Image (cartoon, grey):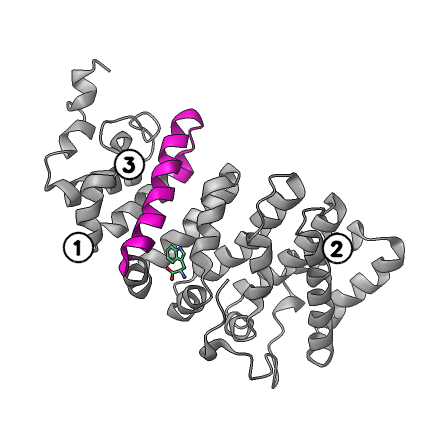
Amino acid sequence: MANLPTSLSINSPPYGGPAPSPLTTPAAAAAALAAVAVQSKDRKMASAEQLVLDLCDPELRENALLDLSKEIVSIYPSLSPPTLSPGASNRVCNALALLQCVASHSETRVLFLNAHIPLYLYPFLNTTSKTRPFEYLRLTSLGVIGALVKVDDPDVISFLLQTEIIPLCLRTMEMGSELSKTVATFIVQKILLDDVGLRYICTTAERFFAVGTVLANMVVSLVEQPSTRLLKHIIRCYLRLSDNQRACEALQNCLPEMLKDGTFNNCLRDDPATRRWLQQLLHNISGGSLVSALQPGGLEHMLGN
Ligand code: TRP
């Protein structure tokens, strides 16, 4: 990973001043921490319960977050070489679920970003082991980033771009499970939907083709293992890329044939919104001549189905 830009250097206490208390109510937060306790030894359970209580107290919160960060950092040594145990992965994933609450809450999202907490997760996204503990860890980490991008906030996108989240997402899109591929593609989609994000990805041919190649490979793999929800995010990514003129021209050559020839008509049978995105995409890159293949009476008709 590249060095942090100076604009992101850690220079202010993340939780200075009276902070809001978002974790007093969400049941998810309590459940997540209860799960931390369940996964831990009895000895640790009391302290985990205490952590939940401490997070709700502005005086004790900073220290509780420090304990959480220690839990997360403690597994770094088992990332490479990959020796992470299922139990350790579980515990950290529960801690991450708690962080996801902080990332999701409107009052804490900005603080979460200013504290650069997402960076704690990047080492998890940089792993390549396909075993369950690692897959679960990547999925949960992507869930935290996914929660951040769910609200359309340019500051979130700017942070993610500056910290080079995209190559990490592309890695999961290449080798993850269907679910983590879907979350990673969703994150890339949300970045593309941001004007700065689209420009960032289309600035160099290398970036564009890195994204385009991974999207195309996923399309090919969907033939063997269909997933309507993954296909939907892939198509939305392509459609958004086609809003950029140079990317649109490049897509005329590198959009997978399978998106043009009706291969996925059946998969999209019950998803009219995604079908319209695909038609719009084909319209954008071809000026309309390809769209007929996907409409009733088009290629479907010619093929007799
Ligand atoms: N440093 C690389 C760049 O700025 C980061 C990167 C790798 C990247 N692959 C990418 C960025 C794909 C966008 C898309 O190009």
Earlier in the chain: of badge 1 and badge 3, it is: 1
Q: Type of residue at label 1?
A: Gln
Numbered tag placed on residue 245 in the rendering: 1
Q: Residue furthest right?
A: 43
**Which circle, 1 or 2, is nearer the viewer?**
1
Numbered tag placed on residue 101 in the rendering: none
Q: Is residue 15 visible?
A: yes
Q: Type of residue at label 2?
A: Val
Residue 53 figure quarter = bottom right
Q: Residue furthest bottom?
A: 17
Q: Residues within 10 Å of mark 1 (few under 14, many from 20)?
A: few
Q: Name which residue lies at 35% across and 49% down.
A: 211
Residue 137 image offset from top left, x and y in percent: 62, 49
Tell whether position 225 is magenta.
yes
Gap between marks 1 and 3 measured at Cα: 26 Å
Residue 19 image offset from top left, x and y in percent: 60, 80
Identify the residue position indicated by label 3 in the image: 272
Q: Secondary structure at mark 2?
A: helix
Of helix, strand and loop, which mostly describes the magenta segment?
helix
Residue 303 figure quarter = top left
Tell whether position 259 is magenta.
no
* In the displayed structure image, the side of residue 159 where residue 203 appears, left or right: left
Residue 16 image offset from top left, x and y in percent: 61, 84
